[in-house]
């Protein structure tokens, strides 16, 4: 996925604002190869937990409808991990089964290091890291 530094900074800001709880949301992309991120849509973590995230199903459907009405697609689901490295948990793997082809961007905040984001495709329980390629715009 191509993503502007400003959008990546928005994901990291969201993660910092919600800490110590996990944040969550989705990223809209313009279709094509490679997909280009065009907007971050924050969601409410209804679990309000540092260990997991949950998104209200109705909120998620409304967001996806809005994304599609603007000619875009759901490109990624994102969340933060405040206690561990940014790598998919078993919960993420289970949830990803319902979202084939959608990237999982995880913002890591653990360990006092500078926050960083990594992206993954999770298909059939298999995890593959995919590049987040920063663009100027």
Image (cartoon, rainbow, N blue to C red):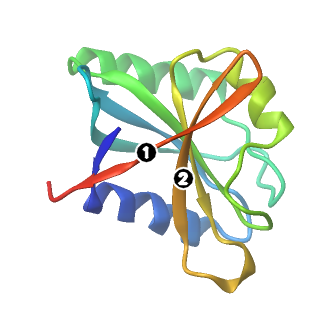
Q: Is residue 137 left or right of residue 14?
A: left
The N terminus lies in which quarter of the figure? top left
Q: Name, please, the residue furthest toward the left.
A: 137
Q: Nearer the viewer, mark 2 or mark 1?
A: 1
Q: Earlier in the sequence, mark 2 or mark 1?
A: 2
Residue in view at x 37 percent, y 58 percent: 8
Q: Is residue 37 left or right of residue 119?
A: left
Q: Between residues 114 and 66, which one lies in front from this camera angle?
A: 114
In this rendering, the answer to whether 17 lies above or below 120 is below
In this rendering, the answer to whether 120 lies above or below 115 is above
In this rendering, the answer to whether 97 lies above or below 117 is above
Secondary element at tag 2: strand
The local crowd at label 2, few if under 14, some if 14 to 19, many if 20 or more residues have their Cα within 10 Å, is some
Residue in view at x 46 percent, y 21 percent: 62
The local crowd at label 1, few if under 14, some if 14 to 19, many if 20 or more residues have their Cα within 10 Å, is few
Residue in view at x 76 percent, y 54 percent: 48
Circle 2 residue: 118
Q: Position of residue 12 (x, y in %)?
A: 48, 65
Q: Position of residue 32 (x, y in %)?
A: 23, 20
Secondary element at tag 1: loop
Q: Between residues 45 and 16, which one lies in front from this camera angle?
A: 16
Residue in view at x 85 percent, y 36 percent: 90
Q: Between residues 72 and 90, which one lies in front from this camera angle?
A: 90
Q: Residue 129 sits in which quadrant?
A: top right
Circle 1 residue: 131
Q: Residue 124 sits in which quadrant?
A: top right
Q: Between residues 130 and 61, which one lies in front from this camera angle?
A: 130
Distance, label 2 to label 1, CA atoms, is 8 Å
Q: Are marks 2 and 1 in contact (CB under 8 Å)?
A: no
The C terminus lies in which quarter of the figure? bottom left
């Amino acid at each position: 996925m191509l993503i502007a530094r400003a959008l990546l900074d928005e994901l990291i800001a969201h993660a910092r604002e919600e800490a110590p709880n996990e944040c969550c949301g989705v990223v809209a992309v313009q279709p094509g190869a490679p997909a280009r991120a065009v907007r971050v849509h924050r969601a409410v973590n209804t679990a309000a937990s540092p260990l997991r995230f949950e998104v209200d199903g109705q909120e998620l459907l409304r967001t996806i409808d809005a994304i599609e009405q603007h000619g875009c697609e759901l490109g990624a689901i994102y969340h933060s991990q405040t206690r561990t490295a940014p790598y998919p948990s078993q919960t993420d793997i289970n949830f990803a089964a319902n979202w084939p082809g959608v990237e999982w961007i995880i913002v890591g905040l653990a360990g006092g290091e500078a926050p960083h984001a990594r992206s993954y495709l999770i298909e059939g329980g298999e995890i593959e890291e995919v590049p987040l390629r920063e663009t100027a715009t």
